[in-house]
Structure formats: C-alpha cells, structure tokens
Image: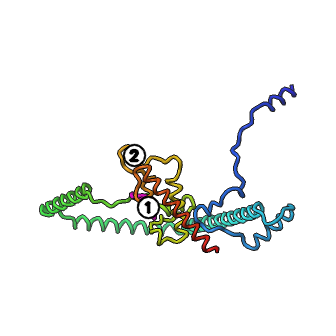
Amino acid sequence: MAKSSKTSASKSPKRKTAAKKAPWSRSNPRKRGGKPAKHLSPAKKAAAKARAKRAGRPYPNLVDNMAVASKAKSSTSSKSKASKAKASKAKSAKAKSSKTKSASKPKSASKAKSASKAKASKRKSSSAKTARKKPSGRSNASKKKSTGAGSRKAAAARTSPIRRSSRRPSEKDPHGGLTAAGRKAFAEREGAHLKPGVTKKASEMSPAEMRRKGSWAVRFYGRAKLPALQDKQGRPTRFALSAHAWGEPVPRTEAAARKIAAKGERLLARYRRVKDKGAA
C-alpha cells in the first residue's frame, strides 16, 4: 500500500509557478521612473563585503548588497513601530491621570457649577424671547426677490457654454507627432527621453541631426510594406502625420512616402561623408 501511495504522489501533476527574472537581469525600476539611483553607505558596503567573504563569494555582488539594504529597511521599520508604541503608552497614561483628577474633585463643587449654568441658560432664553419680533412684510418681499435673482444666476451658470476645462494637456499633437507634455509623460512611463523632430534645412543641419532625420525617414517610409496612409474617410493617419513633425509634407500616396525615404538615404550618405572627412 505504501508503494502505491508513493507512485500516485509522484504521478500527481505539479503546479506551474511563474518564473521570475533574477534581479540582475531586470532593469532598475528607479531608472525607469526617472528617479536617481540609491547607493549604500560605506558602513553598509563594509557589511556586505564581510557577508560575501563569509559565504565565499567575490565582492562586489548584487546579492549581498540587496541583503544589507533589506536589513536596513527592516531595522528602520522596527524603530518606527517602537516609537509608536511608546507614544500610545504615554497617551494612555495621560488619560488615566486626567480621569483620576476629575474623580478626586468634590461633588458639591460640580453641583454648584451645574446650578449656575442652568440659571444662566434660563436668563438667556428669557432675553431671547423678549428680543424676538415678527418680521415685516417688506423684509419678506425683499427676501423673495433676492432668492429669485440668486436662482436665476445659478441656472445661467449651469447652462452657460463657457466652462473651465479640467482636461489634462493632450499628449498627441493633432498635426502629427507628440507634444512636449506627451514626451514628458512617455519618459515617466517608459524611461525613454524622446526629442522633437528635426525640421531644419539640410544645409543647416549638424551631422547628428542628419543622422537622426535620415534614420527616421528610412525606418518609417522605407519599409517593404507601408501601413495605411489614409483612413476610410480619406483623412491622413497618425503614421502619415508623423512626417509633419519632421518638417516634411504629409504623404497621401505610397510614392510620396518613398520620396521621403529616398531623402533620408541621401541625408545618411551625407552624414557618412562628413564623418569620414572629420576622421581624416
């Protein structure tokens, strides 16, 4: 019976666990978010080095650095918990002392205070009754008029076409490409720093700008199969509008797109000639 149970246990299907990437094969999340990287202090580096030496590992390495950093985090969290516990104990002690003080006061003094408060409230109520008067008809009419004017203004404000826009700035430029806000948002999400397109003339471009614009033109409009340049209603697509962001006419036909690609090849050839001259 024992053998059958072992065989059945061995044949049972194992659960598949999602394989996580090792930390050294993942990109730094702080770098992706555009935040500065954190570094260990000299004392923590010494502790990590001693830990690696005990384990027989070469240093520097990511494993010992991560272990030391996690210990530092846990120690700070335990300190904060201890301080919170101390503060709660002090509060409870104060509350107990205040209760004991209130209980130690004589009952006669509390009764005298309550009686004086009752007399003062009776006086106030009698004076308020004598001071009250019936409102005149004129005041009622003026109130009605004021409320009517206020309601009219509120209705006009609701139906007015001019309203404050609570929308965020658009990331896509309607004429093509991304806006400055769009490039900033893309950098926050992806960690890539995009630059605006080069719209200068070829004679005014630097070698780096020639290389940028030439590689863009060949990548976009020099591919074997082009995406759609117009939608069903005959409007240019975002793929076609990207030419406007680089100072080129928006292509509506495949021939126009191929012209931009040929221009990009010429710019790349010019960039190579300039580079060779500089090297010589």
SS of the residue at dot 1? helix
- According to the picture, the residue beneath numbered tag 2 turns out to be 231
Residue 6 drawn in magenta: no
Q: In the rendering, at what x and y percent does residue 38 appear? A: 66, 68
Q: Which residues are magenta?
A: 173-181
In this orientation, which residue lies closer to the viewer: 180 or 160?
180
Q: Amino acid at mark 1?
A: Ala
To which residue does mark 1 refer? Answer: 245
Instruction: Give me the residue at 40% from left, 48% from top.
Output: 230
Q: Is residue 155 visible?
A: yes
Secondary element at tag 2? loop
Name the image quarter holding residue 76: bottom right
* Disc 1 crowd, CA 10 A, few/some/many (<14, 14-19, 20+): some
Picture quarter containing residue 84? Answer: bottom right
Type of secondary structure dominating the magenta stretch: loop
Q: Residue at x 18, y 58 (%)?
A: 148
Q: Does any portion of residue 168 appear in the rendered image? A: no
Q: Please state if 67 lies on the left or on the right of 90 as rendered.
A: right
Percent position of residue 228, x then y: 44, 46
Where 254 sits versus 122, above or below? Answer: above
Answer few, some or many: residues within 10 Å of disc 2's Cα (few below 14, many 20 plus, some between 14 and 19). few
Q: Is residue 128 depicted above or below 238 in this figure?
A: below
Q: Is residue 180 magenta?
A: yes
Instruction: Check if mark 1's residue and mark 2's residue have beta carbons within 8 Å.
Output: no
